[in-house]
Image (tube, helix red, strand yellow):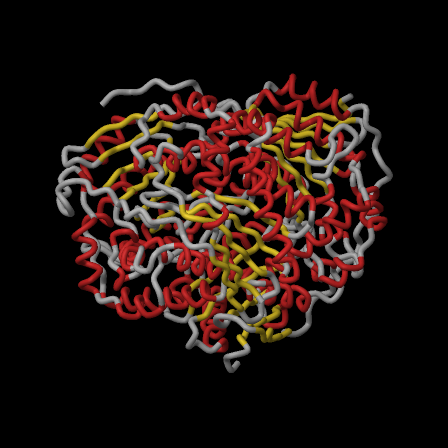
Amino acid sequence: MAAVPTPAHALRAQRATLTNGVDLLHNRAAANPSVVVRAMVRAGASRESADVLGLASFTGTLLREGTEHISKEALAEELDGLGAGLSVDVGYAVSVISIKCLSSDIARAMEILGELLRFPAFPADELERRRGQLLTELKELDDNTRVVAERSWRQDAYPAGHRFGKLPVGTEQSVAAFQRDQLERFFRAWYGPSQTSLIVVGDIDLDTTRDLAERVLGDWRGGRADPVAPTLPTTPPPVAAERRVSMAGKTQADLVLGTTTFDRRAPDYDALSFANHILGRIYFMGRFGEKVRDEQGLAYYAYSELSAGFGSGPWLVRAGVNPTNIDRALESIRAELARFQADGPAEEEQVDGVSSLLGSLPRQLETNEGMAAVLGEIDLYDLGLDYLERYPDIIRALTRDQVTAAARTWLPADHLVTTIAGP
Amino acid sequence: MVATASASASFTETRLANGLRVITREVHERPLIGVWMWYRVGGRNELPGTTGISHWVEHMLFKGGARFGKGEISRAISRRGGALNAFTWIDCTAYFETLPADSLELALDIESDRIYDTRFDPDEAEAERTVVISEREGSENFPEFWLREEVQSVAWREHPYRLGVIGPKSDLRAMTREQLYAHYMRYYMTNNAALVIVGDVQTERCLDLVGRAFDPLPPGPEPPPMGIVEEPQTGERRLIVRRPGPTRYILLAYHAPAASHPDAAAMVVLGAVLGGAASPIAWGGARGLGRSSRLYRALVDGELASAVAAGYELTLDPYLFTVDATLRPDVEPQRAEAAVFEQLDRLQREPVPADELTRTKRQLEAQVVYSLEGVTNQGFALGFMNLVAGDTGAWETFPAALQAVTAEDLMRVATTYLTETNRTVGWFVPTAMEA
């Protein structure tokens, strides 16, 4: 373990490995007397087979419903008594179990996290209760135009059976069918030291953190012996398509337009990410925001996002528009994309793109959660603890030609899938 | 020129000769600065016909002034890596910029420009009409929005709080550029605003820069006072919203005291006992707290609802204490409602046990700490408490007052405010389901 010096006010992250192989990333930040402790387990939805959609999500949320030594009620009372927030977020690559607590309570918070990771009980009655709750939540998602638009988009953009073709959360049918032993099997298969990184950010030093982590997780065994990357098969560019989903009682249509791209670790990632910054983020939601909202007044929001993960992740433009404006909005978005692919970023946009990305780093790292998110990305995609030190050079080295070429290569107009969910 | 000044350990407060309140706080952990500009105008200052006007004016303030052309405000902030935004609420309209500390002057330049010189170009006002309508339509896609708007409009007879903030479509379609401009002229002036600056800058230098940017500006005529007072409610009000939707929702609203009322702290604790704690003085905080709260136990663990919340907000005039729940599809609203009433009755009958009260206060203490992470959040807390409590120091004294609330206080406020005659009960029933 070695401390990596980084520029003042950027990350001062350190890495250690517990005796059982758990990767520990730590960053001292004393601005707020609180700590974020995050177990990032490579046990996301990409581990599921097609017949158990949502199993990772269901398993993850059941962790906080009681363990072998602490009942759900006792756990809730203790966490509330500490003023500690426990949350579980399940994505495609990872399930993240986080506790945010006051610095003075870090020892107990770590013990609780260790308990959840090692001794979940999956109580049968809590499983049923959670199932009912989740089925209600799924009904709400079915009624959400944003969610329905993305869900339909994924279905059209990915080959049948590919996990990216469905949202991480399951379906009514899959959730209704889950059995306790399926959860236990999934847990035993994927929760273990080789799949887990522990991220600790806040008002606590590394030695204390490592000692605590070693005490609560050091003798944890289980899961696979070696790390297995949660990488999904790459997919061919989708066939261009447009689909409208009619939903009762809605006034606004949510539209999603985009294509599938590549793995976060692909060589073109930085160039395409920069192109996305200009297209859908910089200034006020980039060129899409400027055109669709500011100039045409068609939408409250219009922006784009690149979610390259472990596999051919999506690039999506999203906008919420009145149904009478759908065609105009789509036309504007497609025209902006075509213009960018023809001419690339303007000189000013290229310069501003660099300064805005670099200038925003202190802001991104201002909170413990912000730092934990950056550390998580660094760890997950193996970017290196010195990533933020190298980042300015990476961004400054991008040329307008590279950025333009990335947009041409990876966002081809003849492979755009469009979905509209609304009235 | 400084007209008045005061200082505490945690911030300084100054009033310029033109009436602008200036609040500063040094925070040096990061090379960042958070700048907030708070105007005392919001839904509370609106009348039927022009409801939503404060919010629309807020949008216009991003369209440039004398020194910034269209699009230049966000460009200038963005190219320095900063963030900016604004929000309109029932009591206020507030703008913020978060920037590298060496860019403080840019934020001051923007705020001192748009306070008096915002362009109200007719074409831009027109383009923004559809943006604001689109913002409303985005909310209309959620059943909870319809229920909340309906309950709000029924809970009051007189007070403009019944009109909300975004405004009905008819007003948004009918309002004119002249009305927007008149509203801006009436409320945007140094003597109706507070500037809050938190971050990595020495106070003396900060005040010097503020003076240079704002001292040359004149005060305006005092905005008209808002004198409407709601008479006490004398009987339960009920409503049902029937629209397409995924499941049933219930929303209970009780008239509750203003932020300046001595009962405000007890109301915050009461909300936390029922539904878990949130910071009353700033946004943000930890997720996943409150799973031991009474309503969570009764409704979520009790398999009646997938989510439940209780809330009380600090406001200038008396506002609402609310309880809302997302019901499981097989649960009738009256069943869930009865389960909520049972918990409210219990609070009136029995003192909250000491261990539960301690747990609740600890949640509040922690949530306040979390919510003050970062310069932008601290600037929010200072400006918000200055506005609603009329006392900037309340950003520290109000959280302290929460810790002094007793079980007897909770019983008293539960008995005083959570009464049948003081409540409005709303149900959202999907058209596909029977009530």
Residue A330's place in the image compared with B4, above or below, is: below
Q: How many marks?
A: 0
Observer-nearest of B90 and A195: A195
Residue extending farthest to the bottom is: B434
Q: Is residue B277 visible?
A: yes
Q: Give coordinates of residue B247: x percent, y percent.
A: 48, 71
Q: In the rendered image, which quarter contains the N terminus of chain A?
A: top left
Left or right: A389 in relation to B44: left
Name which quarter of the figure residue A253 lies in: bottom right
Picture residue at 45% right of the left edge, 35% below the top: A406
Observer-nearest of A206 and A167: A167
Name which quarter of the figure residue A8 lies in: top left
Picture residue at 65% right of the left edge, 56% below the top: B134
Residue A38's place in the image compared with B48, above or below, is: above
Q: Is residue A72 visible?
A: no
Q: In the rendered image, which quarter contains the C terminus of chain A?
A: bottom right
Observer-nearest of A169 and A153: A153
Q: Give coordinates of residue A194: x percent, y percent.
A: 18, 40
Q: Give coordinates of residue B300: x percent, y percent.
A: 39, 65
Q: Give coordinates of residue B19: x percent, y percent.
A: 78, 32
Left or right: A395 in relation to B383: left
Observer-nearest of B104 and A153: A153
Name which quarter of the figure residue B209 lies in: top right
